[in-house]
Image (spheres, helix red, strand yellow):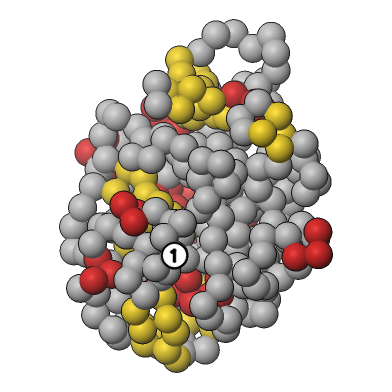
């Protein structure tokens, strides 16, 4: 849908695109001990907050506005995005195979591939995205890579279908878009970042985004070229780590750029139907020159079976 944020798979946007026999192999009969898996949930109080932005610098086509008051019940949300170690526990317990593994490929940022990497298919509207055969959460840049030393990094190449399957196993769910924004704001309001109006206040890097000239030169001024371990940057006032930057995070809601204008005030859950689902928070590839979406009020979307090297999730209850 929006190739700068993450290209969409063209071979399907529904469960029908993933073989039914593959989806039926997962065993969710035994719920895990979330604490034993290392998943910590943070309590978010109920209340009212102002959602969205009317900043003309943003992306009206994304439906970032109008600003509207939302009333939410109390809920809990993961302190971090689900990590490779945590996702591996799910796979070990259920035998689940992700959308990327079933399709046999996924989208990888070309800047993370070695110079001698064989030619791969690119994305016409965003040539920095490459279709890499074999890429998945286990091997994020393809078969030459692995997550052996990245257990505390967010799991990536995760489709919406994969994220909801994990939630089913965990006895959890994906956060609604409104819950995600309330949690990400950390009790603040009227600003693009939970810490204030400036991306790097006093020169401090508070999130993992693309630094330098996109897409050719990442200076890694914030300390990272690709994903960073969870907990690498200061938590927001609600105790959540990396709600901005690092990886995009799936939400429960179907995406509709006109939804804010008609959404209910109390506990909105998104439109009833649609091809794409909301993703929030931006990623290590976001750069102000082309994708100013590393804000608490920014939004994007992708197809349910799409996966990329900058797309993960966190759970809610």
Left or right of residue 295, residue 123 in this image: left
Along the viewing direction, whichever of 280 and 212 lies nearer the viewer: 212
Left or right of residue 43, residue 27 in this image: left
Q: Which residue is drawn at 44% across and 56% down?
A: 58
Does any portion of residue 283 appear in the rendered image?
Answer: yes
Q: Which residue is drawn at 32% across and 71% down?
A: 66
Q: Residue at x 70, y 13 (%)?
A: 115
| Number of residues whose C-alpha sits closer than 10 Å to that of mark 1, classed few (under 14), some (14–19) or many (20 or more) | some
Whether residue 151 is situated above or below residue 63 in the rendered picture: above
Whether residue 272 is situated above or below residue 4 in the rendered picture: below
Measuring from the top left, give residue 261's x and y in whole percent: 23, 71
Which residue in the protein does label 1 denote?
A: 55
Along the viewing direction, whichever of 6 and 15 lies nearer the viewer: 6
Measuring from the top left, give residue 227's x and y in whole percent: 68, 44
Q: How many labels does the image show?
A: 1
Helix, strand or loop status at disc 1: loop
Measuring from the top left, give residue 108's x and y in whole percent: 55, 29
Q: Residue at x 47, y 82 (%)?
A: 75
Q: Quadrant of residue 230?
A: bottom right
Does any portion of residue 166 appear in the rendered image?
Answer: no
Left or right of residue 312, residue 47 in this image: left
Along the viewing direction, whichever of 78 and 295 lies nearer the viewer: 295
Whether residue 128 is situated above or below residue 166 in the rendered picture: above
Q: In which quarter of the image is residue 1?
A: top left
């Amino acid at each position: 849908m929006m190739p700068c944020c993450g290209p969409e798979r063209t071979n399907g946007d529904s469960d029908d695109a993933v073989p039914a026999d593959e989806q039926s192999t997962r065993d969710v009969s035994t719920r895990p001990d979330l604490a034993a898996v290392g998943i910590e949930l943070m309590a978010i109080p109920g209340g009212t907050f102002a959602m969205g932005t009317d900043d003309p610098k943003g992306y009206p086509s994304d439906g970032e506005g109008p600003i509207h008051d939302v009333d939410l019940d109390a809920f809990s949300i993961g302190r971090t995005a689900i990590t490779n170690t945590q996702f591996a526990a799910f796979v070990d317990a259920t035998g689940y195979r992700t959308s990327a593994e079933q399709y046999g490929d996924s989208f990888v940022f070309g800047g993370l591939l070695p110079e001698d990497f064989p030619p791969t298919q690119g994305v016409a509207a965003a040539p920095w995205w490459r279709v890499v055969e074999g890429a998945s959460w286990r091997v994020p840049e393809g078969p030459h890579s692995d997550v052996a030393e990245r257990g505390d990094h967010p799991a990536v190449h995760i489709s919406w279908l994969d994220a909801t399957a994990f939630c089913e196993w965990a006895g959890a769910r994906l956060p609604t878009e409104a819950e995600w924004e309330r949690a990400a704001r950390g009790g603040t309001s009227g600003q693009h970042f939970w810490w204030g109006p400036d991306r790097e206040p006093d020169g401090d890097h508070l999130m993992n985004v693309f630094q330098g000239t996109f897409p050719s030169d990442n200076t890694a001024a914030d300390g990272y070229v690709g994903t960073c371990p969870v907990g690498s940057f200061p938590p927001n006032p609600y105790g959540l780590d990396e709600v901005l930057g690092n990886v995009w995070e799936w939400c429960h809601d179907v995406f509709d750029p006109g939804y804010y204008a008609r959404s209910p005030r109390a506990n909105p859950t998104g439109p009833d139907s649609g091809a794409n689902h909301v993703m929030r928070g931006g990623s290590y590839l976001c750069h102000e020159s082309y994708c100013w979406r590393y804000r608490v009020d920014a939004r994007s979307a992708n197809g349910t079976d799409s996966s990329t090297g900058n797309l993960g999730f966190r759970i809610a209850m």
